[in-house]
């Protein structure tokens, strides 16, 4: 009984912290956009409407404009002798250009180069679905989730339409650089395998369409945090009946069922292809969704099962490291050893949303009555973490088969870069230090992203060093 009460208290604290942080992000974006809209429209709009109506109208306009911009893009990127674009891929609960108004998931890092794309993918959709969306975002056309996958998971086969694509010339001769944060890194790896397997009807793709992949705190081998949040360690797919993820599930279902257009334009979890809107399923459909009889949480076609150790092993078993692609990984940690025990490396240096999880993940012990996720598994290997992912998971693909890798202390240690090898370094940071809020990272922010962009522009090439017309700005 005492353990149950303690679990409820922990759930309450976790839910409260995440809700407060989510509200902070959302309200910050809304306030900035309302201010921007008010300044642009002048005092005339404010005189014509009551204050409350003016604020709501401004938000609707900004949200709709953001959605239009995202669908249309800032104009396709066409190679005219310039270097390939760098595509920044967000992680779980993330967002791309056009969502949350002017807020940047990558804290403005995209402004460091004039050939950067920031796609908006489903924030909670499965790795598979996000990989399919990423392809059509770049190449153009209507998102095709695949006939077999769509039937198995119970959703529409086709999704949103990108009339022109943001990089329609994408092919072997015009490859791209990818930078994936958190789950975004695994999305790129799944996309890469799909390209190699020619899995997009009507497109003659190949593995050489991707020039480089930089993994920033990438979820390459899963995380033990999924079990703290509610995934069952026994199978890595089901959820406990009372947990943080169940609260998340209920919130997402209600959000999508209400289907408030301006709100969905402002932020979207990405489940439109499941047609959970009240206009489609009615009240009876809502009951089915809440009871787990239908929808993405019933089929397991969402991102959390892909982030368990078991789910990552399933994905990794068919993902390759390709010989003509350059790989670099930044693994983050916010832990240290104290008298032989792994503990958080600091209190003030960890984001409040992550501190409890850093502490819990340090103490993770695989249940004795559950089968080990892989041969050779040891709890102590998974103790170092950044509050969301275990450091061992972020260095390079290692389970079920370890891929070629090389540890580096300084970026210059890997020059000249060799393709087909996962170069990785370990840096002191929590999971969200280099996203959303640039001020938290300070000078580290510029050092990190300048290093990433310079590597893409000057050290990752297949034929001859490219000419860079505009140096990376500070």
Image: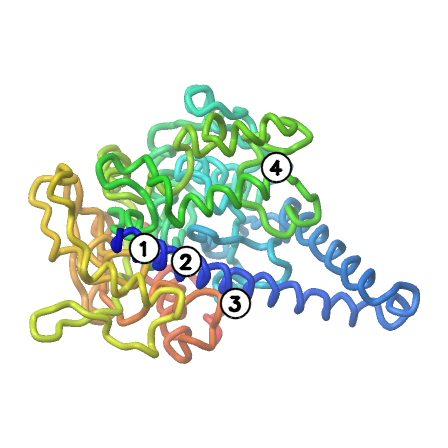
Colour pattern of the rendering = rainbow
Q: Give the label on residue 5, or none.
A: 1
How far from the left and from the top, in percent, is residue 409? 19, 70
Q: Give the label on residue 257, or none.
A: 4
**Front-lying residue, 237 or 84:** 237
- CA gap between label 2 and label 3 equals 33 Å
Q: Quadrant of residue 25?
A: bottom right
Secondary structure of the residue carrying numbered label 4? helix
How far from the left and from the top, in percent, is residue 429? 31, 70
Q: Which residue is mark 3?
A: 108
Q: Earlier in the sequence, mark 4 or mark 2?
A: 2
- CA gap between label 2 and label 1 equals 11 Å
**Front-lying residue, 90 or 138:** 90
Q: Left or right: where does residue 334 sit relative to residue 129?
A: left
Q: Left or right: where does residue 122 sit relative to residue 302?
A: right
Q: Give the label on residue 12, or none.
A: 2
Q: Earlier in the sequence, mark 2 or mark 3?
A: 2
In this rendering, which labeled residue sits more in front, label 4 or label 3?
4
Density class for disc 4 (Cα within 10 Å; few <14, some 14-19, many ≥20) is: many
How far from the left and from the top, in percent, is residue 83? 46, 56
Q: Earlier in the sequence, mark 2 or mark 1?
A: 1
In this rendering, which labeled residue sits more in front, label 1 or label 4?
1
In this rendering, which labeled residue sits more in front, label 2 or label 1?
1
- CA gap between label 1 and label 3 equals 43 Å
Q: Earlier in the sequence, mark 1 or mark 3?
A: 1
Residue drawn 22% across the image and 56% down it? 395
Q: Earlier in the sequence, mark 1 or mark 4?
A: 1
Secondary structure of the residue carrying numbered label 3? loop
């Amino acid at each position: 009984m005492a353990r149950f009460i303690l679990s409820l208290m922990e759930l309450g604290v976790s839910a409260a912290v995440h809700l407060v942080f989510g509200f902070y992000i959302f309200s910050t974006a809304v306030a900035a956009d309302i201010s921007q809209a008010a300044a642009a429209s002048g005092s005339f709009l404010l005189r014509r409407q009551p204050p409350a109506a003016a604020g709501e109208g401004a938000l609707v306009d900004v949200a709709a404009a953001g959605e239009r911009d995202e669908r249309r893009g800032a104009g396709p990127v066409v190679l005219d002798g310039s270097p390939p674009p760098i595509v920044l891929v967000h992680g779980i609960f993330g967002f791309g250009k056009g969502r949350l108004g002017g807020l940047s998931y990558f804290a403005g890092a995209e402004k460091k180069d004039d050939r950067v794309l920031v796609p908006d993918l489903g924030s909670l959709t499965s790795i598979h679905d996000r990989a399919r969306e990423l392809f059509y975002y770049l190449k153009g056309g209507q998102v095709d989730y695949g006939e077999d996958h769509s039937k198995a998971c119970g959703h529409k086969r086709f999704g949103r339409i990108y009339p022109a694509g943001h990089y329609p010339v994408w092919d072997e001769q015009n490859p791209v650089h990818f930078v994936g944060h958190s789950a975004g890194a695994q999305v790129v790896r799944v996309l890469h395998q799909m390209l190699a397997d020619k899995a997009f009807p009507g497109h003659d793709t190949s593995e050489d369409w991707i020039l480089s992949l930089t993994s920033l705190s990438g979820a390459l081998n899963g995380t033990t945090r999924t079990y703290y949040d509610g995934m069952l360690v026994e199978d890595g797919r089901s959820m406990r009946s009372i947990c943080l993820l169940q609260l998340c599930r209920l919130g997402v279902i209600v959000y999508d069922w209400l289907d408030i257009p301006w709100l969905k334009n402002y932020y979207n979890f990405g489940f439109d292809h499941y047609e959970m809107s009240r206009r489609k399923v009615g009240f009876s459909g809502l009951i089915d969704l809440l009871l787990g009889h239908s929808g993405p949480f019933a089929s397991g076609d969402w991102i959390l099962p892909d982030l368990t150790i078991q789910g990552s092993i399933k994905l990794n078993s068919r993902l390759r490291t390709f010989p003509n692609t350059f790989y670099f990984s930044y693994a983050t940690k916010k832990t240290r050893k104290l008298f032989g025990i792994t503990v958080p490396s600091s209190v003030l240096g960890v984001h409040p949303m992550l501190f409890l999880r850093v502490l819990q993940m340090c103490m993770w012990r695989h249940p004795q009555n559950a089968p080990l996720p892989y041969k050779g598994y040891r709890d102590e290997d998974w103790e170092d973490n950044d509050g969301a992912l275990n450091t061992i998971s972020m260095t390079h693909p290692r389970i079920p088969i370890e891929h070629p890798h090389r540890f580096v202390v300084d970026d210059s240690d890997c020059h000249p870069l060799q393709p087909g090898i996962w170069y990785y370094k370990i840096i002191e940071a929590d999971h969200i230090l280099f996203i959303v809020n640039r001020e938290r990272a300070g000078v580290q922010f510029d050092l990190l992203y300048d290093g990433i962009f310079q590597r893409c522009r000057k050290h990752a090439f297949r034929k001859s060093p490219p000419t860079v017309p505009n140096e990376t700005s500070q």
